[in-house]
Image (cartoon, rainbow, N blue to C red):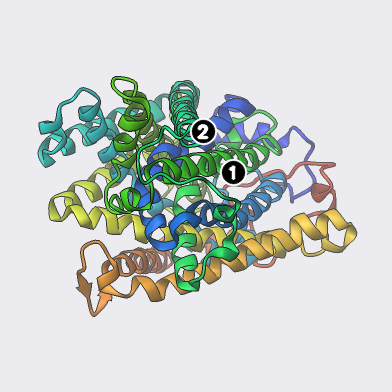
């Protein structure tokens, strides 16, 4: 294989074809939609807005605005790393290049683990809201009915992911439009009612101070809200995981990821402001552990049957995210297997559908197994899983930011733009997320702060789940090193980008997964 920087601009697509994935299958809009859908904006807001208000009160929009900053900085890192290395394994390949195979393997594992943890939770919400949409409240309250429908959803959406990314993208186009339009309608009507004085008692007039993080008096509350923010913004990088299947793979996915974070910011600020202003603090705080808040408030805002639009938004949001969340895990697993960091079977691509069918099916099956087991163990256990998810996301996002600075280290002083967008921004984003990771470990260690209140070895369940999955990854990595092909672990760390690749003059020709050591 040629070394980085020696291939012509067409090398990326040619190599992607050689790996079996369908090159040029999706364009910018479809990639953007995949990034947006993966975050599940309607569901994410429904799940966390009550908790954020409990932590910071009317400064909830400020907390979401502050959470956006490290996300945007890391999105910049994803853009530049993808331009140099358009590998569907994203963080795995990039961290391997910059920080070595051991750290790279753990970054890839964290990506896969997040998908396994969250797929069931998203499908669970989709199932419950499906019953609510048709006023089947008895079934919505039935654990068995919800679980059966959720598993069915995961199975069907996994099948769609196997059939092809084009079909997945077309499905997402419909689902994302439905939820965004419903959210904008809801926010607009709610704010008009507030300013017209027709909102119910307890409503509040929005103020500029609501958007100021400096108005949040408690540092602990700010840290807690930032950790929640990591969860609601997480998912936009699915756009970059589709890089080998997108048009202009060196720039389209990275640009789509950046645009997705900006659109999410606008959506979150609009809806959170509308919810707090219309419903008031007391009402919102009452839904701290209940994701039906949007449905509840929508009844007062829109009336029946128009409130069903918001129920439909959360339903389609959860469905869309269930499907697109499969993409990062399956593509990362494919990349790791190509790099001989996982069994070869996981690198197989379906000859007809041109998708990593084995990796995709395993992701779906693992997600179902985790979901069903914890669903019947405890409903609160499912919520603690989402808290643990933020730890893993902060872990691999921060590694990606550090990897960008290390990989581009020889290019940072060549221009002010390089210094700011490839150096300062990714470094600040990585440092902020690393800080959130370690600080949140202290808060999640307290059993009383978890949904279950359960303790394992005196530690809170979310921390045990998060660190447990990282420890499991460490064990699997060591086992693979001892029992598998050791080629991957001989790769060189602290590689630097080729100057011509950094300037965009030529494209990197990929070897399997991450580049071999020189």
**What residue do we see at 44% from left, 23% from top?**
178
Task: Judge left or right: residue 425 versus residue 296.
Answer: right
In the depicted view, which residue is nearer to us: 282 or 20?
Answer: 282
Residue 488 location in percent, x, y?
Answer: 54, 60
Name the outermost residue toward the right: 414
Determine if residue 391 is in view.
no
Q: Earlier in the sequence, mark 2 or mark 1?
A: 2
Query: According to the image, label 1 marks what residue?
Result: 261
Label 2: how many residues lie within 10 Å, few (<14), some (14-19) or many (20+)? many
Residue 401 location in percent, x, y?
Answer: 63, 60
Task: Judge left or right: residue 436 versus residue 24.
Answer: left
**What residue do we see at 29% from left, 34% from top?**
126
Q: Which of label 2 and label 1 is nearer to you? A: 1
Question: Above or below — where is 87 with respect to 168?
Answer: below
**What residue do we see at 31% from left, 42% from top?**
293
Determine if residue 26 is in view.
yes
Residue 385 location in percent, x, y?
Answer: 30, 57
Q: Quadrant of the C terminus?
A: bottom right
Quadrant in which residue 212 is drawn: bottom right
Quadrant in which residue 407 is drawn: bottom right
Question: Above or below — where is 255 with respect to 285?
Answer: above
Residue 217 location in percent, x, y?
Answer: 51, 70
Query: According to the image, label 2 marks what residue?
Result: 34
The secondary element bearing badge 2 is classed as helix
Label 1: how many residues lie within 10 Å, few (<14), some (14-19) or many (20+)? many
In the depicted view, which residue is nearer to us: 123 or 196?
Answer: 196
The secondary element bearing badge 1 is classed as helix
Task: Judge left or right: residue 315 versus residue 41.
Answer: left
Question: Above or below — where is 276 with respect to 229?
Answer: above
**What residue do we see at 62% from left, 42% from top?**
262
Name the outermost residue toward the bottom: 458
Cα–Cα gap, marks 2 and 1: 12 Å
């Amino acid at each position: 294989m040629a070394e980085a920087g020696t291939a012509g601009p067409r090398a990326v697509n040619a190599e992607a074809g050689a790996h079996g994935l369908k090159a040029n299958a999706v364009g910018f809009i479809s990639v953007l939609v995949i990034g947006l859908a993966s975050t599940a904006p309607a569901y994410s807001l429904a799940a966390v807005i009550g908790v954020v208000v409990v932590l910071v009160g009317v400064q909830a929009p400020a907390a979401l605005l502050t959470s956006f900053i490290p996300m945007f900085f890391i999105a910049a890192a994803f853009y530049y790393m993808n331009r140099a290395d358009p590998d569907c394994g994203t963080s795995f390949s990039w961290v391997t290049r910059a920080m070595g195979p051991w750290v790279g393997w753990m970054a890839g594992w964290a990506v896969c683990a997040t998908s396994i943890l969250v797929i069931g939770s998203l499908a669970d919400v989709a199932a419950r809201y499906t019953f609510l949409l048709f006023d089947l409240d008895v079934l919505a309250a039935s654990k068995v009915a919800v679980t059966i429908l959720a598993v069915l959803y995961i199975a069907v959406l996994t099948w769609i992911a196997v059939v092809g990314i084009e079909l997945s993208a077309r499905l997402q186009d419909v689902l994302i439009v439905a939820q965004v339009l419903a959210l904008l309608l809801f926010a607009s009507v709610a704010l008009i009612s507030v300013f017209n004085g027709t909102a119910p008692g307890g409503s509040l007039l929005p103020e500029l101070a609501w958007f100021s993080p400096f108005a949040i008096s408690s540092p602990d509350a700010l840290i807690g809200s930032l950790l929640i923010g990591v969860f609601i913004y997480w998912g936009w990088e699915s756009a970059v995981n589709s890089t080998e299947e997108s048009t202009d793979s060196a720039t389209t996915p990275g640009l789509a990821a950046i645009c997705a974070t900006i659109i999410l910011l606008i959506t979150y600020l609009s809806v959170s402001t509308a919810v707090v202003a219309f419903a008031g603090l007391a009402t919102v705080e009452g839904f701290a552990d209940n994701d039906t808040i949007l449905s509840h408030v929508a009844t007062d805002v829109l009336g029946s049957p128009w409130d069903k639009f918001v129920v439909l938004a959360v339903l389609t949001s959860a469905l869309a995210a269930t499907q697109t969340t499969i993409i990062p895990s399956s593509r990362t697993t494919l990349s790791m297997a190509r790099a001989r960091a996982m069994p070869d079977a996981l690198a197989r691509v379906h000859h007809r559908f041109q998708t990593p069918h084995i990796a995709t099916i395993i992701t779906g099956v693992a997600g179902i197994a985790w979901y069903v087991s914890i669903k019947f163990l405890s409903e609160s256990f499912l919520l603690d899983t989402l808290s643990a998810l933020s730890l893993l996301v902060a872990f691999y996002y921060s590694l990606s930011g550090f990897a960008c600075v290390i990989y581009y280290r020889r290019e940072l002083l060549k221009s002010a733009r390089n210094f700011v967008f490839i150096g300062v921004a990714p470094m600040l984003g990585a440092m902020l997320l690393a800080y959130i990771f370690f600080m949140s470990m202290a808060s999640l260690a307290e059993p009383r702060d978890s949904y279950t209140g359960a303790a394992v070895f005196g530690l809170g369940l979310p921390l045990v789940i998060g660190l447990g999955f990282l420890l499991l990854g460490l064990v699997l990595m060591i086992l693979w090193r001892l029992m598998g092909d050791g080629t991957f672990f001989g790769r060189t760390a602290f590689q630097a980008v080729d100057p011509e690749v950094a300037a965009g003059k030529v494209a990197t020709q990929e070897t399997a997964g991450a580049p071999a050591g020189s």
